[in-house]
Amino acid sequence: MRVYLVQMGSVPGEKEKNLEKARQMVLDAKPACESLILFPEMFATGYIPERAEELAEDFETGNSPTAQMLSQLAKETNCFILGGGIHRADNCFTNRVCLYDPTNATGKQPYYDKVHPFFPEQKDFAPGKEITLFKTQDLTLATAICYDLRFPEEFRKAKANGAQAFTVQASWPAVRNEHWETLLRARAIENQAYVLAVNNVSADGTYIGNSQVIAPDGEIIAKAEAKKEQVVSADISASVVEKIRKEFPIY
């Protein structure tokens, strides 16, 4: 499978403009059919949970602007897409990402709610229950969002349940970039799994990207330029994961 990381900057609150930019970046990249495409955390709104009431959507029904764009884009490109935003739940919000499958005829998308809301989210955002496993082609994926990266026990549970690759969709600030780089490689090495990490960029330098694909042995096999909007891609394979785990059976 080929994976594409869409490292982009989002104008806070400008949902329509952000969605159109995201769509155009993917179309310009001309992704191969049946690839996996990842967007950063809250890519349609920017990371502004304090405006959750204004910007929240209903990802449950698939009728919201972000959900509709991602669903249509999945069909248009014949690719799997992971993206989401602020989901309006019962009396609260969740930080949600959904998997948009071009072959899904039901309209019901599998989803993951961020298990560990970051400090600005903790007042109004309910935590998810566990990291969700998705199946795309022959790979089993586990999805995490930003602050989840700091909690290795969630990744270990997902690995024990069959995860071969982890996706990390983030709005990770530049001031803690060294933590970002270190923790991503740690999650790959300790679980012998791919880590597919996509991050925001911003004009003011708050977010600088450094999106990357890390192999199960910790090697960085693709990396976006810092401070630049771009799409980077790499090939990943379940057979590579199983080969590394067999040759070095740390479990």
Image (cartoon, rainbow, N blue to C red):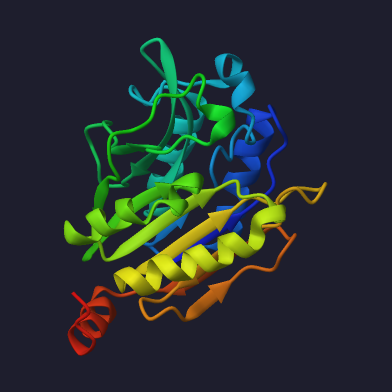
Residue 244 horizontal/vertical position (percent): 26, 84
Q: Residue at x 37, y 54 (%)?
A: 78
Residue 199 horizontal/vertical position (percent): 59, 53
Residue 71 horizontal/vertical position (percent): 40, 38
Is residue 12 found left or right of 82 in the rendered image? right
Q: Quadrant of the C terminus?
A: bottom left
Quadrant position of residue 192: bottom left
Q: Residue at x 28, y 34 (%)?
A: 129
Residue closer to the observer: 105 or 140: 140
Quadrant position of residue 95: top left
Q: Residue at x 23, y 37 (%)?
A: 105
Residue 37 horizontal/vertical position (percent): 45, 55
Q: Quadrant of the N terminus?
A: bottom left
21, above or below 226, in the image? above
Q: Residue 150: tell me if it is visible.
A: yes
209, above or below 85, in the image? below
Q: Residue 210: tell me if it is visible.
A: no
Residue closer to the observer: 43 or 91: 91
Is residue 236 found left or right of 129 in the rendered image? right
